[in-house]
Every structure is written in structure tokens, then in C-alpha cells.
Image (cartoon, helix red, strand yellow):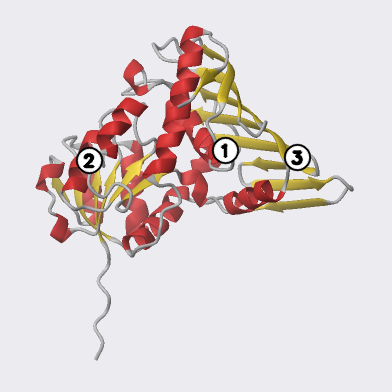
Amino acid sequence: MTTAARAPRVAVVGAAGWAGSRHARAFANAGANVTHLVDKDERALALAQELGALLVPGAQKLHSDQLDLVVVALPTTLQPAICADLLNKGFRVLTEKPVAADAEGAAILGAASGVDERLMVGYTLHQHPCAPLVSQWVRDNNVIAVNVRSVAHKQNVDSWRPDPKEGGVAVVNGIHAIELVSSWFEGAPKVLATSASSSLYGSPVPEHVVSTLEFPSGVVFTMQSYWSPWQEPQGLNQGDWSLTIDVLATAGRLLWSNDSLRMWDRDGGQYEKTFAPSDLFLRQAESALRFCTGETPAVTFAQALRATEIADAVRAGAASGAKEVISP
């Protein structure tokens, strides 16, 4: 008589927040046993009761022999030290993107034990069914330019987001595009020009950022990222995030817009496909459970650090108005 396999045991740190609660429900739906929620906010109590999890006030209450994965979904500035402590204690960790608010914060995590083997960085864009098709197309073509528009719906810029240490919209939202596009091209890009504004909400951080970068190969990457008080009719994450990636190559053009993909050949051929809306948190949870069994994650610490270093250069360009800021 065979014994049924035990469901992977998962804890979520920061479970009361929007992302943390999405992670917790996604892992439960993916078949994991969400055994612990970590939060001092009483809003997490109802979620703990819903999932049959134990609510504890701090990550120090977790034990590595009782868990297969710890998910960390906290403000960006808080994540590196907590993730480093968990890694040093032997846990396998999935951390929300970005890996840190800046490269200085990332260094705390970079010094942790097992950071290259036991850390997965949660860039959900890689989980979309369009992502592998777009990445393959980019590899197969001589790309000239990439243009990205990334808009996140926020009724208010509140909670931890207006803290200048968190970096503003380029670090919180635009980093998705920075990470994905930088995974396609080698080398450190120059930031040719950047402008930033906080006029939409009047917060102390950049709420709208436009930046143009150039990779060593000559590929030009232009990114527009902003928080919007207006929810768009279509988008990722149940309409909370509208994304368009337009790639121009010598032999054709590709346009990824939310759940649709369109390609044009130079000879006039066209390909178009529309995907059913994806729960990116669920798809990421499924990927993270494979990570628990040894699969390499889509985004490792090294790639996440590279994206954060590029975001640092974008922020520096916005702050100084300087031209041609080089990312490390």
C-alpha cells in the first residue's frame, strides 16, 4: 500500500497585505498546505481561519524542519534582512519583487547563505503564457528597440508606497519591465534620459517615470511606468495592471498587450493569439512548488540584482537630470 505524498508546507510573511493575501490563497489553490501566516495585523486572522493556518506575529516563530517554503511579501525595504535571516536558517524562500529597493539593500541579501540555490524572486511576468513566446522571438530576431508602457491602478499612493526609501513607481512597478527586458540583452545599459513626476497624486516619490536606455548591442529600451487613479478596462492581475510591450526588429514587429500577442513579418505575414486571463499569482505558486523540488526559478538573485542596479541608474538619472548614467 502506497502512502499519499504530503502537500508542500508553506508560510506567508506579510499575509495581511494585498500581495501577501494573494500569495496565501494562490498556494492553497495550487495544492500546498499553508500552515503559517506571519503578520501582526489583525486583518490576517480571517485569512488564517479561512486557510486553516496558524497566525504568528514574527518570522522567528517559523522552523525550517516544519516548512518547505517561506513566502515574503513585505515593503521592499524590509524584505532583504528578513529573507537573509530565513536563508541563513536553512529555509527555501520566495520573495516578492524587487529583490531590494536598491543595490545597497540587495547586498544584505547577497551575503546570505544559499542565496543562489534557495531563493526565488517573484517576478510574475515570467509566469504569463506570452512570456516564453516573446522571449523566444527576441532571441530569434535582430532587435532594434523595445518600448514598454506599464500602468498600475492605485486609487491612492498610500501605505508604504510614498516612502522615498521605497523608490517610487520605477522600483515598485516599472521594475517588472526592467527585469524582463534586461533578461533578453547582455551588458549594463546606459540611461540616456529620464524624467519623473509626482503630479498625479502629489506624493513624495516619483509617480510617473519615462526613461530611455541603450544596451551595449545598440538596442534602445524606452519605458513609461506610472500609477493611475483610473482602472483600465483590460489588464493583468484582474485589471489592476495594464502592460504593453512593443518590440521592433529588422525582420518584423511584436506587440504584447496584456493577454494578447501579435507578430508581423517583414513579408506581410501576421500571427495573432489571445490568451484567457491568467492568475499570475497561481501560476507563480505552481512554479514555486516546482522550485521546492529543485527546479531553477525563472528569476534568480543574480538576475534580480541586475534589474535593481539598472533601476538605481534610472532613479539617479531622474534625480539629477544627468545624461548617460551607466548602471553597474
Q: Mark 2 points at which residue?
A: 84
Q: Where is residue 289 in the image (x, y as percent from the top left)?
A: 35, 60
Q: Residue at x 50, y 37 (%)?
A: 179
Is residue 307 among the parts visible in the rendering? yes
Q: Earlier in the sequence, mark 1 or mark 3?
A: 1
Q: In this view, does 305 lie above or below 156?
A: below
- Amino acid residing under circle 3: Ala
Residue furthest to the bottom:
1
Query: Which residue is label 1 attached to?
Result: 181
Q: Nearer the viewer, residue 35 or 108?
A: 108
Q: Distance between the residues labelled 3 and 2?
A: 41 Å
SS of the residue under disc 1: helix
| Residue 77 location (% of width, % of height) | 29, 28
Provide the residue designation for mark 3: 249
**Residue shown at 64% from the left, 37% from the top:** 245
* Amino acid type shown at disc 1: Val
Which of the two discs, 3 and 2, labels the residue nearer the N terminus?
Answer: 2
Which quadrant holds residue 256?
top right
Tell me: 87 left or right of 245.
left
Tell me the quadrant of the picture where the N terminus can be found: bottom left
In the displayed structure image, the side of residue 297 where residue 128 appears, left or right: right
For the residue carrying disc 1, how many other residues have a C-alpha within 10 Å: few (<14), some (14-19), or many (20+)?
some
Q: Label 2 to label 1, Cα distance in Å? A: 27 Å
Query: Of marks 2 and 1, which one's residue comes earlier in the chain?
Result: 2
- Pinpoint residue 218: horizontal percent, then vertical percent: 67, 31
